[in-house]
């Protein structure tokens, strides 16, 4: 008798979500959204980039943007994932843009969740305006492996805020400085949804949202929330992702 592995062969009604975090975060930051998606019967893979989160012990000068791209592509390939709804928050959009350029055949829908959208030839630092944070990042980038985690992010409850800050880790800096090279138009022929948080407060994200609006085939949605919308409004984010998964 041949046994079918349901993990490798999901039902036609079961969707697969791969979630990419922003800076200083790991897959843990998707926990509230993942719970909603899993409760609806879907498979969820919250990924952590090399050098942060539970992989912080891997931080080294060898970590590049290409490392983070490989983190995602290898996770998808070795889990034999297909028809993936690929979602990225904030910095994760940089990595996701390259992944979409390389393995569109594995993907179903692409979702930028208040995420950075780079142009070919740019690095993440090119999108960040010349302000105090950018100057500090550039200065540290010349002599340090990582940027310390920020403090003071706003959350509706002290418990959520404390949990969030307790798990942040320094962010590898080299991936911010590496320029991407795209061989196909943004989205690579896939359906793309850009979800922008309003009112927008981060210049790099506001620029990315304007770029998304300039691509005729992309759907742009607005949601009233702070930047960490997946933590502020996880049920609503899960609903948006489920809608994306059912779109052609």
Image: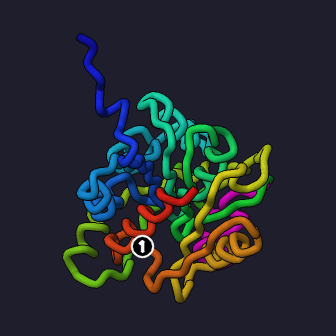
Q: Residue furthest left?
A: 159
Residue 122 location in percent, x, y?
A: 76, 57
Q: Residue at x 53, y 89 (%)?
A: 199
Q: Which residues are magenta?
A: 121-139
How many numbered dots are placed on residues in this image? 1
Q: Main secondary structure of the magenta part?
A: helix
As displayed, is residue 237 above or below residue 80? below
**Is residue 65 part of the magenta span, yes or no?**
no
Left/right placement of residue 224 relative to residue 208 reads: left
Q: Position of residue 159 (x, y in %)?
A: 19, 75
Query: Residue visible at 34% across and 60% down?
Result: 29
Residue at mark 1: 228
State the residue in front, 119 or 84. 84
Is there any visible trace of residue 63 in the rendered image?
A: no
Q: Is the residue marked by circle 1 packed among few (<14), some (14-19), or many (20+) residues within 10 Å?
A: some
State which quarter of the image contains the N terminus: top left
Residue 232 position by quadrant = bottom left
User: Which quarter shows the C terminus?
Assistant: bottom right
Q: Viewer-proximal residue, 202 or 245?
A: 245
Residue 134 image point, x, y percent? 63, 71
């Amino acid at each position: 008798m041949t046994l079918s592995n349901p993990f490798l062969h999901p039902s036609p009604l079961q969707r697969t979500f791969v979630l990419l975090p922003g800076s200083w975060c790991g897959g843990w930051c998707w926990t509230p959204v993942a719970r909603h998606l899993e409760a609806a019967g879907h498979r969820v893979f919250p990924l952590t980039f090399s050098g942060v989160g539970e992989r912080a012990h891997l931080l080294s000068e060898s970590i590049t943007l290409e490392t983070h791209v490989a983190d995602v592509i290898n996770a998808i390939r070795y889990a034999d994932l297909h028809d993936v709804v690929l979602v990225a928050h904030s910095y994760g959009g940089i990595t996701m843009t390259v992944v979409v350029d390389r393995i569109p055949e594995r993907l179903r829908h692409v979702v930028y969740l208040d995420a950075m959208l780079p142009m070919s030839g740019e690095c993440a630092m090119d999108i960040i305006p010349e302000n105090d944070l950018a100057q500090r990042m550039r200065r540290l980038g010349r002599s340090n492996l990582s940027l310390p985690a920020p403090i003071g992010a706003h959350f509706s409850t002290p418990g959520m805020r404390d949990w969030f800050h307790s798990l942040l880790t320094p962010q590898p800096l080299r991936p911010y400085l590496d320029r991407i090279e795209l061989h196909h138009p943004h989205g690579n022929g896939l359906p793309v949804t850009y979800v922008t948080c309003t009112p927008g407060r981060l210049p790099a994200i506001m620029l990315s949202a304007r770029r998304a609006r300039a691509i005729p085939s992309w759907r742009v949605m607005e949601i009233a929330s702070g930047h960490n919308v997946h933590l502020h409004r996880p049920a609503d984010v899960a609903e948006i992702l489920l809608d994306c998964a059912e779109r052609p």
